[in-house]
Image: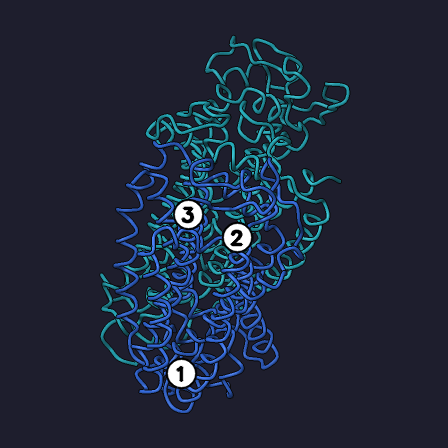
Chain colours: A blue, B cyan
């Protein structure tokens, strides 16, 4: 396997891991006031995410950084082309990020309401827009021969892009609801599980529409038809999606959450594998597409970065797993009386 | 205004704002780590209360630093696409290394530190804040190696119409990068020291928590004193490097128009860029610039007139910012030496405490001025001698940038106000009365 291909796989895996990890706190954040009926419940929801959300978001910084380092031309075209969409995502993530630090700092109902709003909007918008952006990449962006994006924000809001956005949003909402079902107690836990079940049905519809639309609108299936063994990836997605519902029915929260995590990772990889060897297909002329070969860094850079990634990413996974264990268990209402931090 | 100018303004605004918050994390994390270690070692509860008090301020400050860092990374792609494409092979990898090596560590362990009081032993808990301190400084190192490469590109080859990595070790180990790193973190440590001293002085002046804030003041003082002194020496070495590596920047820093031996330094001047001269010059010291830059009064220093007009950085801004930075740097030495003399009788020295309270914003100004010298002085290049800033901008619509710049100004402005308001509130409130306790004791 050549270096650009190895980096293509790593690139896809990093984005998939980012969606899997930040997915649950973007989902839970979007559902803050929907599920959190009282101040105590909303604080429980915050508390389930607090030790982890920032570590999750660094996966986005890393996914962005790796796009920059391994495929600089793709990084340049992707983020300048999707300028407005990315700015919306960034501002949403900014307001959401500071909500965690600011909300509890002033004891005032309206102040908390402001930051709750920022957390919800700031979680909802990226969940939707990441889906819109990636669906458009699967479909192909209007890139000219110089790699200049010939469109606007509204070009992205086509039916296929929106269906991708809706699917991502629902994936994250279910993921977040299941997270709350395993991390909280009492009626909040029950409502979260019920919410996950209801959203799952919508997700199923959205996923079917997206998969069928992908056949019509994109070339994603070409690689699969050429190498049928690859169909294992979408099969895993479908199996995980169904298993998730079975475990939900049994009330097995963690199993359902892991099934949801598997669904997100394999759904992302389904798209990424379908893209290969393209990174950003051009919808104007296939010859103008950015591939892993015409946009990769030099072999030396790819080698150095591979060394860095193979050394440090496992280490990151190790200590972040440790943090999950350190904060294991459900957040109880009684925990809120004790100011854990101070 | 075109997309270029708006993108420059946007990047400047984003960096300025990010750099209001990040320097404090670099030094304050170390001070908190020292406080908590003193508690673990000596069992002095006051240090624990101090660590928690400063921790609250740290967390607000950190949150804003993190979210504004996110936009900086992506702005290279959104607004400087041609730059990213041209130098991503080198520059992108340095940013990616920063994220994997440092930023993960910092974010993960800060959360553990903030929320893990009950779940960790006292020693483990203190280890977490040391990891945060290590990681935030490591993060600064990689970012500044990347910045140093823009100031002085080394270890690259021009191939396939772009700058590609030629020698990774040369990029990472180039002395200029380490100069910039030491220069910047010293400034950051001075800032942390002054913030700690300023807030402590406020409480001491009000005669509350006297023992606690005397300890806090002295820790801040020690850090600021050491690095104020170090910065004078280091700044001088750094300046001599700039003279060699970026002669146009040096000429702008000193507003030196004519190439000459025995080149003077001017304490103050009003540069007249149109007529290529200084309108007013006060306090001319002959030979001083030759001496500082090349350690010989006879050395020839190249003046601005010998650089093509299109290769000159904006003179007035660079010149004024440099004077502000250096002037404040010397003031910090004076203030901290004065403090060293007063260190055992702080409470009886309200005059000094008052000065230190009002001195709190000064290192912020010095740091921003330093950043202006570095970045404005590098113009018109984005990568010195290799790529011009105007060649680097993305092919994007003006309206997009105008909109995002407006959003930056509004959102960042409000966030900044909010963050400083909260930090001032926490600072005034003082430490919690009864320590909740780290380590084994359950809450």
Q: Earlier in the sequence, mark 3 or mark 1?
A: 3
Name the residue located 55 percent from the left edge and 73 percent from the top edge. A120
Labels 3 and 2 share a subunit: yes
Query: Left or right: B137 with respect to A321?
Result: right
Check disc 3 and report the residue beneath it: A276
* Mark 1 secondary-structure assignment: helix
Write down the quadrant of residue A91 in the picture.
Answer: bottom right
Crowding near the residue tagged with mark 3, few <14, some 14–19, many ≥20 C-alpha atoms within 10 Å: some
Mark pair 1, 2: CA separation: 43 Å
Of the two numbered discs 3 and 1 in the rendering, the one whose residue sits closer to the viewer:
3
* Relative image position of residue B165 (x, y in whole percent): 39, 29
Q: Earlier in the sequence, mark 1 or mark 2?
A: 2
Query: Left or right: A200 with respect to B39?
Result: right
Task: Give the answer, above or below, for where A223 lies relative to B275.
Answer: below
Q: Earlier in the sequence, mark 3 or mark 2?
A: 2
Mark pair 3, 2: CA separation: 12 Å
Name the residue located 24 percent from the left edge and 67 percent from the top edge. B122
Name the residue located 51 percent from the left edge and 10 percent from the top edge. B299
Labels 1 and 2 share a subunit: yes
The label shown at residue A137 is 2
* Relative image position of residue B37 (x, y in whole percent): 27, 59
Query: Left or right: B91 with respect to A140?
Result: left
Write down the quadrant of residue B392 in the picture.
Answer: top right
């Amino acid at each position: 396997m050549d270096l650009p291909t190895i980096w293509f796989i790593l690139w896809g895996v990093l984005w998939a891991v980012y969606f899997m990890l930040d997915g649950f706190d973007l989902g839970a954040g979007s559902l803050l006031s929907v599920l959190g009926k009282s101040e105590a419940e909303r604080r429980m929801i915050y508390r389930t995410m607090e030790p982890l959300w920032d570590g999750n978001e660094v996966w986005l910084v890393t996914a962005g950084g790796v796009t920059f380092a391994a495929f600089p031309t793709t990084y340049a075209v992707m983020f300048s082309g999707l300028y407005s969409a990315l700015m919306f995502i960034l501002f949403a993530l900014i307001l959401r990020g500071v909500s965690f630090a600011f909300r509890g700092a002033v004891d005032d109902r309206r102040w908390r309401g402001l930051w709750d709003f920022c957390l919800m909007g700031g979680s909802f918008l990226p969940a939707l827009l990441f889906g819109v952006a990636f669906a458009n990449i699967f479909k192909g962006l209007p890139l000219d021969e110089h790699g200049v994006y010939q469109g606007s924000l509204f070009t992205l809001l086509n039916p296929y892009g929106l269906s991708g956005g809706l699917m991502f949003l629902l994936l994250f909402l279910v993921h977040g609801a299941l997270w709350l079902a395993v991390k909280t107690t009492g009626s909040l836990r029950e409502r979260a599980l019920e919410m996950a079940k209801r959203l799952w049905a919508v997700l199923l519809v959205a996923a079917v529409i997206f998969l069928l639309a992908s056949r019509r609108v994109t070339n994603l299936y070409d690689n699969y038809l050429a190498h049928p063994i690859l169909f294992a990836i979408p099969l895993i997605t479908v199996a995980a999606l169904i298993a998730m519902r079975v475990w939900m029915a049994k009330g097995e929260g963690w199993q359902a959450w892991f099934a949801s995590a598997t669904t997100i990772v394999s759904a992302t990889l389904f798209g990424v594998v379908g893209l290969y060897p393209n990174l950003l297909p051009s919808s104007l002329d296939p010859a103008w597409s950015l591939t892993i070969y015409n946009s990769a860094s030099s072999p030396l850079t790819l080698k150095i970065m591979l060394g860095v990634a193979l050394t440090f990413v496992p280490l990151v996974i190790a200590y972040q797993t440790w943090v999950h264990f350190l904060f294991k268990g459900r957040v109880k209402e009684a925990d809120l009386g004790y100011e854990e931090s101070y | 205004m075109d997309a270029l100018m708006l993108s420059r303004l946007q990047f400047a605004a984003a960096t300025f704002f990010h750099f209001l918050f990040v320097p404090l994390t670099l030094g304050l994390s170390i001070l908190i780590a020292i406080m908590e270690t003193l508690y673990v070692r000596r069992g002095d509860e006051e240090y624990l209360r101090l660590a928690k008090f400063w921790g609250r301020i740290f967390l607000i400050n950190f949150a804003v630093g993190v979210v504004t860092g996110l936009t900086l990374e992506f702005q290279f792609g959104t607004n400087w696409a041609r730059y990213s494409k041209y130098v991503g092979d080198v520059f992108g990898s340095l940013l990616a290394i920063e994220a994997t090596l440092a930023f993960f560590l910092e974010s993960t362990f800060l959360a553990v530190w903030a929320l893990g009081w009950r779940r960790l032993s006292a020693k483990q808990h203190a280890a977490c804040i040391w990891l945060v301190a290590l990681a935030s400084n490591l993060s600064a190192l990689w970012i500044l190696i990347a910045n140093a490469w823009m100031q002085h590109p080394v270890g690259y080859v021009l191939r396939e119409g772009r700058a590609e990595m030629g020698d990774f070790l040369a990029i990472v180990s180039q002395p200029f990068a380490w100069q910039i790193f030491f220069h910047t973190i010293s400034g950051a440590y001075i800032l942390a020291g002054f913030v700690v001293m300023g807030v402590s002085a406020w409480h001491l002046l009000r005669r509350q928590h006297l023992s606690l804030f005397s300890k806090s003041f002295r820790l801040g003082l020690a850090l600021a004193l050491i690095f104020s002194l170090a910065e004078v020496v280091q700044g001088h070495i750094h300046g001599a490097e700039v003279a060699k590596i970026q002669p146009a920047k040096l000429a702008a820093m000193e507003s030196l128009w004519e190439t000459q031996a025995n080149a003077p330094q001017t304490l103050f001047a009003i540069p007249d860029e149109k007529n290529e001269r200084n309108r007013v010059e006060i306090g001319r010291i002959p030979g001083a610039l030759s001496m500082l830059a090349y350690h010989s009064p006879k050395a020839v220093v190249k003046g601005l007139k010998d650089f093509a007009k299109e290769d000159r950085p904006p003179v007035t801004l660079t010149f004024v910012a440099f004077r502000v930075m250096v002037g404040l740097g010397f003031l910090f030495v004076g203030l901290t030496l004065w403090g060293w003399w007063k260190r055992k009788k702080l409470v009886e020295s309200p005059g000094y405490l008052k000065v230190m309270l009002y001195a709190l914003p000064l290192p912020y100004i010095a740091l921003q001025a330093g950043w202006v010298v570095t970045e404005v002085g590098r113009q018109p290049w984005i990568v010195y001698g290799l790529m011009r800033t105007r060649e680097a901008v993305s092919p994007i619509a003006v309206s997009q940038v105008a909109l995002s710049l407006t959003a930056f100004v509004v959102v960042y402005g409000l966030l900044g106000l909010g963050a400083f308001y909260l930090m001032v509130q926490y600072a005034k409130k003082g430490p919690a009365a009864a320590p909740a306790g780290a380590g084994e004791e359950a809450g």
